[in-house]
Image: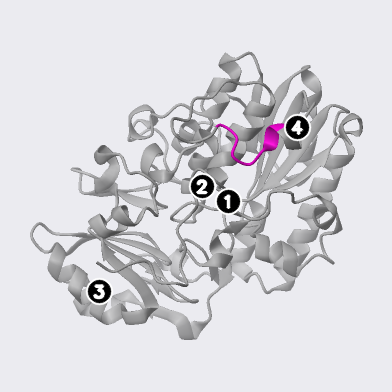
Amino acid sequence: MHPLPGDLHRPAYGTGTLADVLPGAAAALGVPLDRGDVPADPLGLTALVAGARRVAVLLVDGLGADLVRQHVDLAPTLAALASPAGDLSAPCPSTTPVSLTTFGTGLPPGSHGVLGFVTDVPGEDRALNHTQWRDDPDPDTWAPQPTVFARAAAAGVPATVVAPYPYQASGLSLAAYRGAAYAGSVGAGDLAALVLQALHATPRALVYGYFPDLDLTGHVRGVDSASWRAQLQLVDRMVEQVVDGLPDDAALLVTADHGMLDVPAGTRLDLDAVPELGDGVRLLAGEPRARYVHAVPGAADDVLDRWRGVLGERAWVVSRDEAVASGVFGAVDPGMAARIGDVVALARGTWALTAPAQEPGPSRLAAYHGSLTATELAIPLLVAHGSSLT
């Protein structure tokens, strides 16, 4: 066995992860939730927003807790919000499709089935990019778990999702948000206006807003860039608009799906330039900091040995069984385990496992996430209250 190294961390499922935010918000509104052995509200949101009749959750893609702390001067609104629960943890892999489904279902990845940015479709010899997913495979069979939004709506609490207009009918939106009314947004100001409109529309409401642009800016320009800092200031202004417009009996929670770190040229391993890493490989999936390697039949052990030998200390390289046993995905449904690679490689430090010939776009990015370093996992949970709750 190769245990998780000390610089990588297992998400604290059931006690303080992104999976616990929406169930807590719903519980605060009186929605009955059965989460099995997991408390309905381990974050104590019911007490934190006591008296709220309407709750909004704003998820800013890429707004890692470390990045918020590093830039309090650029984000005074975020800095002024209370952080009573401390840092939460993103799931594994710490990447957007996994996190959004974790958020919407209140479940760890091993239970909801969206287990990576790109995963194998078992038995079909093809990969699924969850950000480009429409209706194949069928979302109702690929990720069938009910969402917290659906449970809220069934309990008589109107649920609304405000997210980018083009993704309204995507497979990922259905997996993460099914059961909610979808309001397509076209920018930061529109998102703020639509979130407030949904909050004011009904006496009780669960509203969710998703903003992607900070993450995109970080990927393309780097988180240590003037562009990223300028985008953070726009995010802060958007949050300020929502806070200023909250109904008296409403609460706002601000969180994220993962952190992010810049990857310099010196810590990029070009997988295409190491031919032996392709020997016995049927499909390379995942992303540069969270790789899933699917082997041809009978070659898994040899592929694992080669990857472990070449990558060394640059990544935690383990078999599927070892990764599942480690608990990084939470409890894994046996029917979903094959979506994880025969070999799992989670990057350490600032390493990225790029594949320019196979993935030219992703390999050119400036910043990444996906692995289990503290910076990638730590996400904020910030809270603001309407005037009658303060």
Q: Is residue 86 above or below residue 350?
A: above
Of labels 1 and 3, earlier in sequence is 1
Residue occupying image coordinates x 13% and y 59%:
296
Report which residue position mark 4 lands on. Answer: 194
Which span of residues is magenta-colored? 40-46
Q: Are marks 2 and 1 in contact (CB under 8 Å)?
A: yes
Using the image as rendered, state which of residue 288 and residue 131 is in the foreground.
288
- Tag of residue 307: 3
Mark 2 residue element: helix
Which amino acid type is marked by label 2? Ser
Mark 4 residue element: helix
Report which residue position mark 2 lands on. Answer: 99
Whether residue 183 is visible here, answered yes or no, is no
Give the x, y percent position of residue 218.
62, 65
Q: Is residue 282 magenta?
A: no
Q: Main secondary structure of the magenta part?
A: loop
Residue occupying image coordinates x 54% and y 59%:
377
Of labels 4 and 3, earlier in sequence is 4
Report which residue position mark 1 lands on. Answer: 257
* 4 or 3: mark nearer the eye: 3
Which amino acid type is marked by label 4? Leu
Mark 1 residue element: loop
Residue occupying image coordinates x 32% and y 43%:
332
Give the x, y percent position of residue 145.
41, 29
Of labels 2 and 1, earlier in sequence is 2
Residue occupying image coordinates x 39% and y 31%:
139
Q: Residue furthest right?
A: 387
Mark 3 residue crowding within 10 angstroms, few (<14) / some (14–19) / many (20+): many
